[in-house]
Amino acid sequence: MNNPLLKITNLELGFNTFQGEHKILHGLNIHIKAGERVALVGESGSGKSVTARIILGMFDELTSANFSGDILFNEQRLDLMTKAQKHSLRGKEISMIFQDPTSSLNPTFKIGQQFYEVLRTANPKIKKQAANKIAIDWLHKVAITDADRVLNSYAFQLSGGMNQRVMIAMALVNKPSLLLADEPGTALDVTVQAQTLNLMRELVTQENTAVLFISHNLGVVREFADRVYIIYKGRIVEQGKTHDIFDNPQHPYTQALMAAVPRITGGGIPEIDDTSERYYDPIFIHKGGEEIGDPV
Ligand SMILES: Nc1ncnc2c1ncn2[C@@H]1O[C@H](COP(=O)(O)OP(=O)(O)O)[C@@H](O)[C@H]1O
Ligand SMILES: [Mg+2]
């Protein structure tokens, strides 16, 4: 039972270009245990999204993509599966949430119809009415109260935050054992992103869903993940429990990442010695109409 749910060994990826092969991933090793929340953190272009796409089989038909390595999911070799076998896992055992919820939903079908299709991947015989009931139930779980209206809407008629909740509900409704979340909600404003991430966290905790959480936002990672992989130019340079990585980063790149985080919480504004009377004396006097200037 202690075998990881997902185990990626020596994953390499290159894209063919006119100049020859351009190497992107240089032998990644990543594992995720059942129910574990693991973050993959690194700067833009480091190879986070391509890793998730390979797991989901999205590069299988891309002839310019060459990849190798073992991907073991639930003791099965994902990399050796047929298209049909992989297809049967997608949306059921493994699902994914993308950065931009509005463009990830299908613009031509109402949300209700899309929910129905998702539910049919797990249960091809499900009736529309039963699907509708489950969809409403799940929309309630992501704090959508007017579920009927949402199911009757197209994605473009809903706000970004609403679409993000819909996507979370759709990704989890079939109770997958692994959720790939690629910078979820980064396209949303900060407060909406925080709300939807909290919802996602509550639900994956309830359902014991393992998550590969891709992000460049260290603040969010610290709150969300049990364990962190730091990826730099297609290589994992450090991995460890979240608090160890944050409190005691070892690799110079990790140290640089941590040093780049603005410290608004935690230390707060540095203490200053404010006993001096001079604090009450302005240094500049604003004479109406003129530029601020003129030292007193
Ligand atoms: N389909 C593709 N064809 C060629 N190059 C790609 C393709 N997809 C991604 N890349 C390149 O692979 C590298 C890693 O991309 P990506 O995984 O999207 O980075 P990120 O860590 O920001 O998610 C980038 O240099 C990107 O330009
Ligand atoms: Mg990306």
Image (cartoon, grey):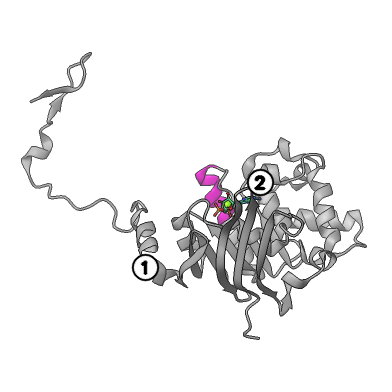
Instruction: Kindly identify the residue that appears in the image at 62 percent across and 62 percent down.
Output: 13
Q: Quadrant of the N terminus?
A: bottom right
Q: What residue type is disc 2 on?
A: Pro
Is disc 2 placed on a helix, strand or loop? helix
Instruction: Kindly identify the residue that appears in the image at 10 percent across and 33 percent down.
Output: 281
* Residue 117 left/right relative to 217: right
Q: Which residue is mark 1?
A: 249
Image coordinates of residue 256 in percent, x first then y, are 35, 58
Q: Quadrant of the C terminus?
A: top left
Image coordinates of residue 49 in percent, x first then y, are 60, 56
On screen, 82 above or below 162? below
Range of magenta residues: 189-198
Q: Furthest-bottom residue in view?
A: 1
Nearest to N terminus: mark 2 or mark 1: 2
Image coordinates of residue 232 in percent, x first then y, are 47, 60
Is disc 1 placed on a helix, strand or loop? loop
For the residues labelled 2 and 1, the Cα–Cα distance comes to: 33 Å
Q: What residue type is disc 1 on?
A: Pro
**Residue situated in front as seen by the camera: 17 or 163:** 17
Q: Which residue is mark 2?
A: 101
Residue 192 lies in the magenta-colored region: yes
